[in-house]
Structure formats: C-alpha cells, structure tokens
Amino acid sequence: MHRFFTTDAIEEGGLITLADGEAAHLTRVLRLGTGARVVVFDGRGRAAEALVESVKPALRLRVGEAVQAAPEPRVRLTLAAAVLKGEASDQVVRDAVMLGAAAIQPVISERTEMTGAALERGRRRERWERIALSSAKQCGRAVLPAIATPVDLRAFLRAPHEGLPLMLVEPQAASADRQTLSTLRDRTVPSAVTLIVGPEGGWATHEIGEAHEAGWTLLTLGARTLRADAAPQVVIAALWAIWGEI
Amino acid sequence: MHRFFTTDAIEEGGLITLADGEAAHLTRVLRLGTGARVVVFDGRGRAAEALVESVKPALRLRVGEAVQAAPEPRVRLTLAAAVLKGEASDQVVRDAVMLGAAAIQPVISERTEMTGAALERGRRRERWERIALSSAKQCGRAVLPAIATPVDLRAFLRAPHEGLPLMLVEPQAASADRQTLSTLRDRTVPSAVTLIVGPEGGWATHEIGEAHEAGWTLLTLGARTLRADAAPQVVIAALWAIWGEI
C-alpha cells in the first residue's frame, strides 16, 4: 500500500488531510481517488491505514487501524555529515534515513566546498527534507528524521550533543587516540550516539585535534579508504552490526 | 601519488608499460611526463612506485620499491549481485570493490529486468570492469576484483561456490529457516563467503526455496527494508563488522 506523510494527528476514526506535495502525489501522480486505501504516518512514529473519503473540493482521509511501521533502532543516532560536493549529500541523507538515523545535522568543515549562505540560497535543506521524506516512505519508517540547519564544524563540536560522541577519521589521519569498532564492541551499547563524518578530502588535521579536545571519540574503520558519500552508510551499518540493530 | 593498473609483472628495476586506457589517463588526462613518479599495481596484490622513463614513442615506466596497498580482507568475499535497473548496478560494483570484495558475479534473477543477451549487447560487463578498476584505484587496493559474466540465478545456486553460502532475503520474505547476523556472530569466522543479494522487488518466493534446498543460508538484516542498490554495501559492512574486518 502507498504511504503518505501527514502533519495531522493520527487517531483511529479521525479525519486528516495531506500537505500539498503529498496530496499531489496521491491524486495526480498515483491517480488514487475516493475509496482508495493507503497508509498514513505522522513522522513521529505513528502509522495507520486510511481510506480516501473525498478528493474534491478537499482531500480527506479517514484514519483506520494502526499499522506496524519499520522498527526504530534502540540506539538513537544523529548523523552529523559534512556537506559534500554537488548532489552527493543526497545519497547520504537517503541512506541514513533508510538505516534508521533519528536526525541529520549537515556540517560545514574546512574542506566543505560550499558555504552556509550558498546552501541557504540553494534551499538545500528543503531538498534534503524532501529526500528524507521519500526515503522514509520507501523503507516503511513512521519516523521522519529532522534535517537541521547546516552549522560550522567548530560550533558543532563544542555544542551539547546527544549520546556517545563519535567522529569518523581516515585510517591515515595522524592522531594519537583513535578507537576501532572492536573497542566499541567491548563497551555497553549506548542509548544514543552522535556520529560526525567528514567531506571529500577528509578532515583538516586541526579539526581532528579540536574534536579530540572537545571530548569526541575518534573512530577508524579498518585500513580501507572509504568514499565520502559511502562512508556514513558503511559506519552506520557497522555500528548497527556490533550493537545488534541489524 | 596517482595509481595506475598494469598487466605487466611488477618487479623492482623492471620496465613496464600500461594498457591504452591507463596510458591515456597518465599522459592525456593527468598530463604527466618523463620524470613523473606514480604508483603501479598489478590487480593481483602487488603495488610499487614507478618512474615515467619515456612517454614517446612508447610509455615506459621503471619499477621502484614496493609500496603497501590497502590491506585485503582475511575473508575472501564473492558478491553475487542481481543486476539492477538502469545503471544502479554501477554503484553496487563501485562500493563492493571499495569494501574489499574479491570477486563480483552479476546474477540474473526472475525479477531482473534485463536479459543476459541485453547485458552483452550493452557491453555491461566491460563497463563494470572499468568501474571496478576506477574504484580500486581510488581506494588504494592492489587487487582488482574480477567481474564474471552474468549468469542465471538458478544455475548459480547449483554451481560450486567458494566458502560460506549466504543469500540476503527481505525481512518480509516467507521462509522457515532464516538466520540473522547474530547467528553468524556466534560461528567461526569463515575464510571465504559467497553472498547473493537480490534485485529491486526482491526474490521470487520459489527462488528463496531453491536457494534453501541447494544449501544456501538465508540471512535477514533486521526488520528494515533496504534499497536494492544499497543492500550489498550494508550487508558487507555488517559482515565486516562482526568478523573484525573493519
């Protein structure tokens, strides 16, 4: 069944509507009409069957029984991902949502090739929100991860963060105090983790030093060099594997 | 330093040349000339520094000291990936090479939308070989995984295979005998694994049955639905995590 996001409260027997994009998808793209059965979800964990009661003058859906959505990970993961060149961050957002990230924080680091102003002009955050929604629909999640406004790495490193603070660093990175997955494997599974992953070309050396000073755990994943657009997905899958999430 | 693939034997002090594509990359794309220092690798695990001794009339490189390439996984992994729509398999090949796959076997399953004949006409295998080479160069491997000729799933399931036989199945797949990562975690790390991953739309039910009958272990990765183009990378990363490869 097709899945649609709603900002309305989902309560059995209640009437809800859809925002413009979702409504257009239902009526114009999928050409569903009165009587169609769909699934609606509120982005905060609730999903239910729904029946299209009217399309004109307004789209209205009657909420039915709750349905089971894809389970959320027990570990709440915030991905803080350096913004990549061109549209490469699109894949990062899509894959992080697929793998169950709870929130995504775009980060501007020294080697990020775009400024916050350029990202804002390009309405990049809105684009990532659309991608996150589409990925949540595709993989059956009822939670829609928030995409935060891009921030500078330095500010982010010093701001309060949720859970275990991890920064992925390249195997070549010169740093005293790197941890591997096996050190994490021997610790208790955290209830939350904030994971920072770098841009093409990696972190500047001083950025790694600043993270270390600010208390972030520096994590390396073996000796392989991972492409920047693939690294977040690989590290999340690896963390899920050792924490029993997949 | 830039890295080039050669089919010549790499021996310190020896002279080697490069095949057309690699030679063009060195001379025309990167515009390197006599005296340039590069790294060459033979695709079978050897890599060495090399000095460009001449460009015209023929490109010749003098082999220098051996260099350390990205380490190969201790587990030899063959990825048997169902061919995906359009160019989606390109990413599967690129990521599998990045993650250290030893060989890639394209597979045609019931829901694959292309025939072996169409793949051959489109010279698809040759395309994937170029992608594998480019990925091996980018991630510093000295081993170039072979891309086998696409085969039908049924034939592949019954043919001899190397190591632990794993087939990734969707969490929804009806099947009696599914294993999870945690069951693999409790077993000895295998020396080799052959991993089959399905197409968009997943396996047909009878395909899962045939794999099970032929002795393949059916593996599910949590309850999340993974996109077909991302699934191989996620499962390889998860296996590497539990087998201590990353």
Image: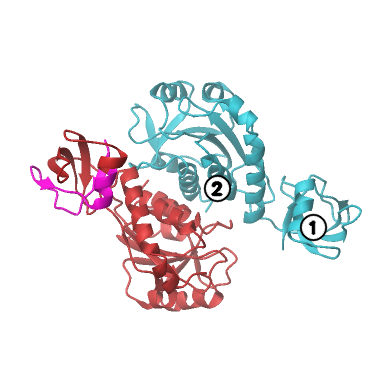
Chain colours: A red, B cyan
| Distance from the alpha carbon under mark 2 to that under mark 1 | 28 Å
- Identity of the residue drawn at 50% across and 73% down: A208
Label 1 amino acid?
A: Thr
Label 2 amino acid?
A: Asp
Give the quadrant of residue B171.
top left
- The stretch in magenta equals A1-25
Instruction: Say which of marks 2 and 1 sits in front.
Output: 1
- Identity of the residue drawn at 55% across and 34% down: B80
Q: Position of residue A61 (x, y in %)?
A: 15, 42
Q: Position of residue A71 (x, y in %)?
A: 27, 46
| Residue B47 at least partly seen | no
Q: Who comes first in sequence, dot 2 or dot 1? A: 1
Residue identifier under label 2: B95
Residue identifier under label 1: B27
Mark 2, secondary structure of its residue:
helix
Q: Position of residue B89 (x, y in %)?
A: 54, 40
- Identity of the residue drawn at 31% across and 45% down: A137
Image position of A69 (left or right of A203): left
Q: Using the image, name the chain to which the residue with label 1 belongs.
A: B
Q: Quadrant of the N terminus of chain B?
A: bottom right
Farthest residue to the left: give it. Answer: A13
Q: Position of residue A37 (x, y in %)?
A: 20, 35
- Identity of the residue drawn at 48% across and 24% down: B215
Is residue A17 located in the magenta-colored stretch of the structure?
yes
Q: Using the image, name the chain to which the residue with label 2 belongs.
A: B
**Same-chain check, marks 2 and 1:** yes
Image position of A26 (left or right of B27): left
Q: Is residue B14 positioned above or below A148 on the image?
A: above
